[in-house]
Amino acid sequence: MSKFPHYFSIWDKASHYGLKWTAWAVLFFLMLPILVIIPLSFNVEPYFTFTDGMLRLDPDAYSLRWYKEIFSDDKWVLAIQNSFFIGIFAALLATVIGTVAAVGLSRPEMPFKRLITALLLSPMIVPLIIIAAGMFFFYTRFNLVGSYLGLIIAHATLGTPFVIITVTAALTGFDRSLYNAALSAGAAPLKAFWDIVVPLIRPGVISGGLFAFVTSFDEVVLVLFLAGPGQRTIPKQMFSGLREQINPTILAVATLLIVVSVAFLMTLEFLRRRAERIRSGQ
Amino acid sequence: MSSKSDSSFLQFKNVKKSYDQKTLVVKDFNLDVKKGEFVTLLGPSGSGKTTVLMMLAGFESITSGDITIQGESIKRTAPYRRNIGMVFQSYALFPHLTVSENLGYPLSVRKLDKSDIKAKVGNYLKLIELEAFGDRYPGQLSGGQRQRVALARALIYEPRLVLMDEPLGALDKKLREQMQFEISHLHHRLGFTVIYVTHDQTEALTMSSRIAVFNNGVVQQCAPPDDLYERPSNAFVAGFIGENNFISGNVSAHKKKTVSVAVPGGRKIVAQNADVGSGEKNCIISIRPEKIFIQPTAHAYDNEITAKFVARYYVGDFIRYNFRLADRTEITVKVLNDLAAPEFSEDEDAKLVWLTKDCFAFRKERQ
């Protein structure tokens, strides 16, 4: 009983455990629908339920059937390629625009700072369906509907606010005298920016870029409006797959997406820790 | 160029600075600095001293007036082309580069050979006695070590001028004194020209060849440390530099260089005239605590007043006495800690004496 302070009454202890178990219950509630997908994706039968064999942990009840199916189906392969292609280029575009914007907005002499920030962040707030409809009508004028370029620009628009937020956060911890020190050491402004500012805000830039990638990767509304049959992405394929052929292929894709997301989260956490290390100087 | 610009290396001519186009932060700043001089800009915070430094470094624009180095205006030169070294209060070491890379950065920007850079970085690491620390990151160094690296980085490319913006402000007292010594030592050894900004007067007095005392954007006095301390030119300088006693009195007679002043609790006091105009009736007299002697004393004296004893504090190397004049003005006296330091009982009368050459009469500031 040494775990609790001596002044704890029975009620204090009860509420301690009550809080603890409630927290676990909430976590369980959030995670269960996601976790349950993973074993089901290895189901040998084309069902969305646990078979008797699966519950008995019979190895024959499990298979990689649905994973093979993904990679042998041209539609899925194209969707995966498209998702990565569009996601990567949209993320790159968003990273460049967002970083430059954040650097400009962090300068004290920048006029209309709040207004510009609000405008740049608006894609996060405005309902997606409205952005999608607006873009659809706008893009038809430039023949961008049904093109890769159109989707890349559209997804970059959605990703830019994330980059602005993460880079702005990285810049608030940035000591401006470092930049001045580089100038007085003889570096021209662009060189000083590249040598000193960029390496120090890099974790913010990369995590913003990853957010932008993930945003594009699981975005479906804009794709529904703007993509032609050639640009179908993973979420779009899942969306139509749900209606056309109900089988655990979707669960296999979902499992892969979970793995990708976890990988991204771990990368972000790694970057965050490294940034902290650099700042504290270890 | 004229003969004047030959003698002065760095010149400020009527420099003014305003951030809002209404109030001047720096009002008409003039200063000539010779090559190799160590000039300190000293003043309370908000007095405009850092602004002067920032204009010189090029991080702030000059509202009006001009700054010249070797006769040439630097107004239209970008900060990175001014060839001025700068040591920042926060050190501003690049945290993602090692100590060696930090020192090498100004050289690599100047596109020196890799081998030259390596040799020079080695020399400077030796100079600051951090040879074993070249591969460490700034975060792994102590405050004093970081300060030395920052100093070496500002010197390594042999700039024509080195600026220091309160470089020792973040260090503790002992380290600060040690670094003062090291900076002066490097200055004597390498002979660079320094403009140093601080609000710490001890630092200014021990390191500088000349000190410019700032207040409200105006230079109150610019003189070598001993002049500043021994012969302050106005009441602000007298009060800002070191400890001082101020006694207000009425001018009774003007002589060539001295004035006679009637003060509470004394007869007439004769003081050196600093800036009292011939028509002025009121003035303030300043006298340093260590220049006052308590009777009986073997020291010669010209002036004598009577004051009531208030308190005696044992400080260690000296003993501090507080006295009170008839008008409740507090007078502090410092006496060396030896057998001559007398004891008093409360409210006992004491006779305080000093020389005319040690006390100054100033114009009364209109508050």
Image (spheres, rainbow, N blue to C red):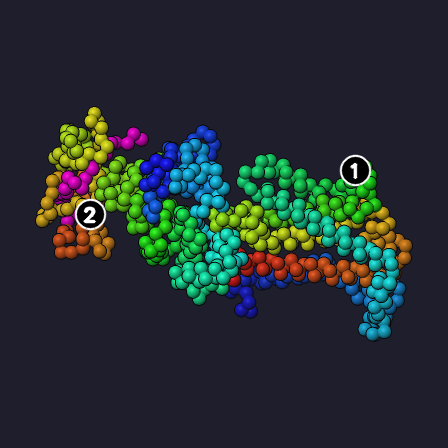
Q: Kindly indicate whether the residues beneath marks 2 and 1 are on one polypeptide chain.
A: no
- Crowding at dot 1, Cα within 10 Å, few <14 / some 14-19 / many 20+, comes out as few
Which residue is painted at 60% across and 54% down in the image? A202
Instruction: Measuring from the top left, give residue B225's x and y in whole percent.
Output: 27, 45
- With B341 as the anchor, is B78 left or right in this view? right
> Considering depth in this image, is B299 or B221 the residue closer to the camera?
B221
Q: Nearer the viewer, residue B23 or B186?
A: B186
Q: Amino acid at mark 1?
A: Phe
Mark 2 belongs to which subunit?
Answer: B
Q: Position of residue B360 (x, y in %)?
A: 20, 37
Q: Secondary structure at mark 2?
A: helix
Query: As drawn, is A29 to the left or to the right of A147?
Result: left
**Chain of the residue that carries numbered disc 1 in the rendered image:** A
Residue drawn at x 84%, y 70% as measured from the top left: A63
CA–CA distance in space, label 2 to label 1? 84 Å
Please identify the quarter of the rendering in which residue B186 is found: bottom left
State whether residue B284 is above or below residue A219. above
Residue B3 at least partly seen: yes
- Which dot marks residue B290? 2
Q: Can residue A49 be seen?
A: no
Magenta span of residues: B344-367
Verify whether residue B355 appears in magenta.
Answer: yes
Answer above or below: position of B262 versus B358: above
Which residue is drawn at the image coordinates 15% and 46% (left, top)? B293
Q: Using the image as rendered, state which of residue A141 and residue B84 is in the foreground.
A: B84
Percent position (x, y) of residue B136?
Answer: 49, 63
| Quarter in which the C terminus of chain B is drawn | top left
A153 horizontally vs B93: left or right:
right
Q: Label 1: state its secondary structure.
A: helix
User: Amino acid type of disc 2?
Assistant: Glu
Residue of label 1: A138
